[in-house]
Image (spheres, helix red, strand yellow):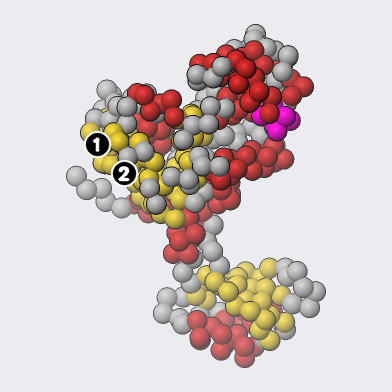
Amino acid sequence: MNNIIEAHNITKTFANGKVALDNVSIDVPAGSVYGLLGPNGAGKTTLIRIINHITAPDSGTVTFDGHPLTQADVDQIGYLPEERGLYKKMKVGEQALFFARLKGLSRQEATARLMQWFERLEIADWWNKKVEELSKGMAQKVQFIVTVLHRPKLLIFDEPFSGFDPINANLLKEEILKLRDEGSTIIFSSHNMASVEEICDEITLINQGHNILSGNVAKIRREFSDGRYRIDFTGDPRDLITSLEPMATDLELVKSSLEDASCLNLMLKPGVEVRDLIATANSAVALRAINPMMASLNDIFIKAVKESQSAPQTA
């Protein structure tokens, strides 16, 4: 798979001596949704600004679609920053047209595309209202539209769901996935790990200016899920828990969707084999299924950040 962005060995230090990025590298596959994650102050925004050609790295290289990134490539990048800004006194449609014309669209083409998007995101009735009348969520819809309107190859969304209710957040997720399926590549930065799980194909986790975790989302979740299992069974839960206590930790009984069955989530202690788990559980209750559990990205995020903070830093 071709990479639309390759940022290799990026280092950036600010005038006050703070190291924002220290030898960070990412490869963003074309046609993917790529999650750029990390705590506040980790360096995500600095990397996004470098990819947008807003600032330059002290060292390292950035290629866009196979060639060194230039200012001209910015026309093929749509960027929705976390800190949004619209002219409050302008009418919504007038402002959207203004931004569309800046992207090189004719008035006729811009109007046609905008009307389609306003209908899709359910804000057509707000075309002639002033921006100051919009709610935060409505304003973010407008800015989302002007970000994607010129159909750039790369879209960068920084906390795109901030301020949205669950229904509108889901609407925006669907649109992001449609854009990916239509050929756009998306870099997606968010603190909402549930959203990242739902839409991201690949992720990179940055902490304190260092890349501490990168890869395919499903593969990472499997790797961090080692030893976690879900047991579906019928029988007395007390018998199962008592039999498994010597070989497992974090035993959690959960409600089953079946009236006559129960579920138990657990983590095996180091050295315990799955076949031993099956044999012991089967001697206590009637097993329906034993399946490995996928770790959540939220748990992975917390664990990886804590481990990186406790690890000794090399010079």
| 43 with respect to 173 (left or right) | left
Q: Which residue is mark 2?
A: 25
Are the two marked residues, 1 and 2, in contact with CB atoms closer than 8 angstroms? yes
**Magenta stretch, main secondary structure class:** helix
Q: Amino acid at mark 2?
A: Ser
Image quadrant of residue 164? top right
Q: Which mark is residue 60?
A: 1
User: Which x, y percent locates residue 122?
Assistant: 74, 30
Whichever of callouts 1 and 2 sits on the residue coming sooner in the sequence is 2
Q: Is residue 255 above or below residue 198?
A: below
Q: Nearer the viewer, residue 271 or 141?
A: 141
Which part of the image, by quadrant, shows the C terminus?
Answer: top left
Q: Nearer the viewer, residue 55 or 74?
A: 74
Q: Is residue 272 above or below residue 216?
A: below
> Helix, strand, or loop for circle 2?
strand
> Farthest residue in the top direction?
89
Q: Which residues are magenta?
A: 117-122
How crowded pointer 2 is (Cα within 10 Å; few <14, some 14-19, many 20+) is rated as many
- Residue 62 on the magenta segment: no
| 86 with respect to 186 (left or right) | right
Measured Cα–Cα span from mark 1 to mark 2: 9 Å
Image quadrant of residue 136? top right
